[in-house]
Amino acid sequence: MYLKKLLEFILFSSIFIAACAVAFCIETNILLGLPLNSFSFYCFVFGATLLQYNLHYSTKKVAVKNSERLRWSLNNKRIHNLLLVIGVGLIVFSFFHFQLKHFFILALLGAISFLYSFPFLPFPKRRRIKDYGFLKIVTLSLLWTLVTVWFPANSFVFDRWLFTFIFIKRFLFMFVLCLLFDLRDIEIDRHEKIHTLPVLLGKKTSYVLSYIMLVLFLLVTLVQYSYQPQLAFFIAMVISAIVTFGIIERTKRTNSDFIYLAGIDGMMLLQALLVYLFSLNL
């Protein structure tokens, strides 16, 4: 009972997804052969993710049937509010350690995040990025890629081609994960007339698309290996893709919050851990 409550807290409070974001940033530096960023940098990434997700779920009213996360959120508004304060605190703390160029990057990322969630686009009726199906998934995947690839690497000198491969792979991988969440919300989005890819394409075609994107991820991994033959990282990516395929198959049988939050989101943490463990042997 206590273990389940702890797991619910870690997953439903978005602490887990915030840790995944930090892990992905660390993975980028390892893959590029760069030193790690500062403690304040990771505080910002963790705090910003915590803030964004708790802001979303503290106001969310509709979810898939029997959503334990929605039930938890409705019963734990105070925890959401506390985590919002902690997120803001971590962001403010980090600001004092950033250079001027970081603020331009943060302004861009902040603007994208804001337009994604709030109705300020100059279009009638649906004016948030998330209300436009294809734009939603591309923007969300790109935002995650910018935060976890471009942001941690921009302060260093690195191999541009290697960076490009990592950037493309991260986008493809995040596209798969985001698509799975859209697949889960297909009935809600259809009811609210949000034309996500699953709503437009249907479930079967959307699952096929997730496989195609995963294959593209492996193909880019192969091209990267031909450019920089590091077998350890190549194996890490292959294992990551195989396990992700298994999770995709599992989502066809259940829409459990734990499968999506620990399983799908957990693919980010798994990939980062694999890269770290394999890097120990280089």
Image (spheres, rainbow, N blue to C red):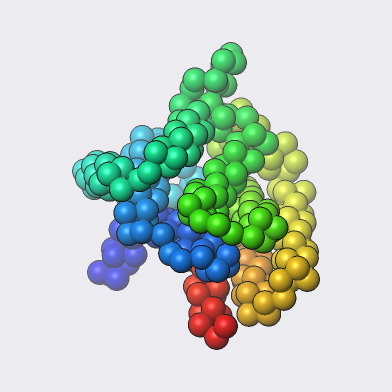
- Quadrant in the picture for residue 210: bottom right
Image location (x, y in percent) of residue 247: 60, 65
Along the line of sight, the residue nearer the viewer: 68 or 265: 265
Residue for point 50% across, 75% down: 276
Residue for point 55% across, 20% down: 121
Along the line of sight, the residue nearer the viewer: 257 or 9: 9
Q: Can see residue 204?
A: no
Q: Is residue 147 left or right of residue 193?
A: left
* Residue at the front extreme, as displayed: 157
Q: Quick check: 34 above or below 173?
A: below
Image location (x, y in percent) of residue 162: 67, 61
Q: Can see residue 188?
A: yes
Quadrant location of the C terminus in the rendered image: bottom right
Q: Quick check: 10 above or below 121?
A: below
Count of picture labels: 0
Image location (x, y in percent) of residue 171: 64, 51
Q: Is residue 236 left or right of residue 4?
A: right
* Residue at the bottom extreme, as displayed: 281
Q: Quick check: 40 above or below 268?
A: above
Along the line of sight, the residue nearer the viewer: 10 or 148: 148
- Quadrant in the picture for residue 190: top right
Q: Is residue 179 left or right of residue 215?
A: left
Image location (x, y in percent) of residue 68: 39, 53
Along the line of sight, the residue nearer the viewer: 236 or 71: 236
Residue for point 25% across, 46% down: 93
Residue for point 72% across, 36% down: 200
Quadrant location of the N terminus in the rendered image: bottom left
